[in-house]
Amino acid sequence: ALGAVLTLALRCTHYFTVLEEHTGFFTEINAYVIAFYALLIVCVLFFLLIAFAGRKNYAFDTGSVRRPVSGLVSLLCGAGVFVSVYGEYSAKDADTSAYTVSSALSSSAGAKVTYVICVLGLIAAVWFIVFGITMLTGKSNGSVYKLLALAPVLWCVARLVVRFTRTVSYLKVSDLFLEMMALAAYCIFFMAFARCSSQVNPEGSPKNIVGFGFAGALLGLVCFVPRLVAVASGHADALYILSRADISDFTLALFMLTAVFARIVPAGSLIKADGTPVKEESKE
């Protein structure tokens, strides 16, 4: 929480001081920029460290019980993905000719990739909604949705690929770089979550849910909250022309945090799908 407050505050200062309009390029590298990236790296490394150091202590709760908070957050995430899909579709014809940046989305091939993203996003939204209903009713632990659970992973991978195709330096454009880091964390988290929730080779995945759940949530908040602040305060021009304030970053961050706190349990307290305790046997 402390890391999020500090990184968000530092990131907000960038939009008011050192970001060039439309391109998102830094006009200068000052102390606020250095402090932001240093703090972000420290936080992400800390999250991964505690996850991998305690990997033997984490387990994924697969009990079929009502989880109202998880269910509501998942439904909210589904709505957020729908909004994101609409934003991706609306941006496919964005005119970048007046700026020093361009995008593969302006080509016919890029437009086709956008359609793929939209389709995968719609499927991912369906999974979030179905999963949310499952959590609200408690009649299933969600393990029956094995293939559908991969939809968020594929959606995030497709979005990451498109950002790699943009003909602008993602190292110089801070918005684009942060999006790519966030999407990479999303991919690893949702792959681990899909393995655990569907019970397909879940060994070793709880640590990824913890580490990349915290890291992805922080990066998602960094991608959304400062942009929303910039737009609300009349500094929308400081955003990179193809990087909007995407509500799905916020809802995905909520989903990841909820998954960590609600589904990750001590390794000795596993329960079966019917709610009965699991007696663990030594693997030595």
Image: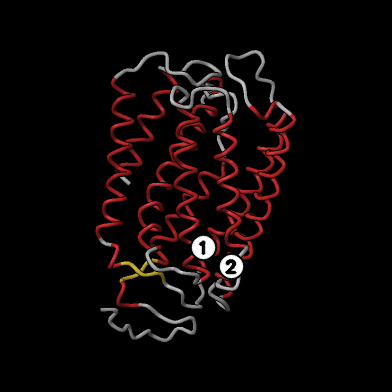
Question: Callout 1 environment at 10 Å: few (<14), some (14 to 19), or many (20+)?
Answer: many
Q: Amino acid at mark 1?
A: Ala
Q: Percent x, y for residue 113?
A: 68, 39
In the rendered view, would you say 253 is above or below 180?
Answer: below
Depth check: give the residue in front, 273 or 208. Answer: 208
Q: x, y percentage for residue 7? A: 35, 35
Q: Is residue 264 above or below residue 23?
A: below
Q: Quadrant of residue 221?
A: top left
Q: Which residue is mark 2?
A: 146
Q: Which mark is residue 194?
A: 1
Q: How many marks?
A: 2
Q: Quadrant of the C terminus?
A: bottom left
Disc 2 on helix, strand or loop? loop
Going from N to C along the chain, the mark reached first, 2 or 1, is 2
Judge from the rendering whether residue 277 lies leftward or rightward of residue 128; answer left or right.
left
- Nearest to the observer: residue 245 or residue 212: 212
Q: Quadrant of residue 145?
A: bottom right
Q: Percent from the top left, x then y, of residue 86?
A: 69, 41
Q: Secondary structure at mark 1?
A: helix
Q: 10 Å neighbourhood of mark 2: few (<14), some, or many (≥20)? A: some
Measure the C-alpha gap from mark 2 to mark 1.
7 Å
- In percent of the image, x 39 and y 68: which residue is there? 203
| Residue at the image position 41 percent from the left and 17 percent from the top | 18
Residue situated furthest front in the rendering = 284
Identify which amino acid the numbered label 2 is placed on. Answer: Lys
Q: Residue at x 72, y 33 (%)?
A: 109
- Residue 181 percent location from the top left of the image: 44, 39
202 vs 248, left or right, is left
Residues at discs 2 and 1 in contact (Cβ within 8 Å): yes
- The answer to whether residue 165 is left or right of residue 119 is left
Q: Nearer the viewer, residue 108 or 54?
A: 108
